[in-house]
Amino acid sequence: MLVVVANCAHGFPQGECLICQTLGGSQTKSTATKTKVADSPEAMAVMSDGRSSPALVPAEPDHRPARRQGGTGMGSFWAILVAIVVGGLLVWAFAGVLSVAFHIAEYAALALVAGWVGYKLGHSRGRRGH
């Protein structure tokens, strides 16, 4: 049993595709593909209630050109270079933030020590014997 059914670009029968009906159906006539119903036992799909339904098999093989694998390696070179630059910028920014934080802590510690020394000097010089 070989049945040829014209399907729309979305894989549904021509009159039942809601996408094509919504868009006006003008696209489906130019991109219609043919599918055949396979009647071999291997191609029969079993439904959940135990009945068999024929599986749809594409009638034409896919003729898209194969993508090149690998290439010249320039893509990976640029990716590594970008990763190094971004990493360097992040380290530089993080070091800058830490440097500012350490300088603030240094100035706070210096102010505390200077205040304590000033207090002790003032306390010792301010005492007068009675």
Image: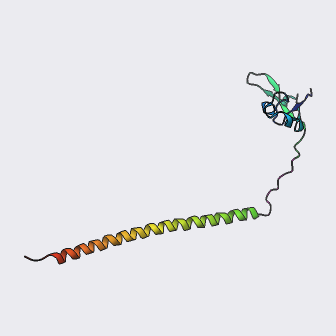
Q: Quadrant of residue 18?
A: top right
Tell me: residue 116, above or below residue 30: below
**Quarter the C terminus occupies:** bottom left
Residue furthest left in the image: 130
Q: Is residue 81 magenta?
A: no
Front one among 24 and 84: 24
Residue under the image location 87 percent in, 38 percent down: 31
Q: Which residues are magenta?
A: 64-72
Q: Quadrant of residue 50?
A: top right
> In the picture provided, is 25 more to the left or to the right than 129?
right
Name the residue rendered at 30%, 74% in the picture: 114
Q: Where is the N terminus found, in terms of image quarters? A: top right
* Callout count: 0
Q: Position of residue 97 (x, y in %)?
A: 49, 65
Q: In the rendered structure, does residue 69 fall within the stretch colored magenta?
A: yes
Left/right placement of residue 84 relative to residue 50 reads: left
Query: From what the image shows, is residue 42 above or below residue 128?
Result: above
Q: Residue furthest front?
A: 24
In this rendering, the answer to whether 91 lies above or below 40 is below
Quadrant location of residue 125? bottom left
Q: Position of residue 89 (x, y in %)?
A: 59, 66
Where is residue 59? Give x, y as percent.
90, 36
Q: Is residue 130 left or right of residue 57?
A: left
Picture coordinates of residue 99 (x, y %)? Answer: 47, 69
Residue under the image location 76 percent in, 25 percent down: 47
Main secondary structure of the magenta stretch = loop
- Identify the colour scheme used: rainbow
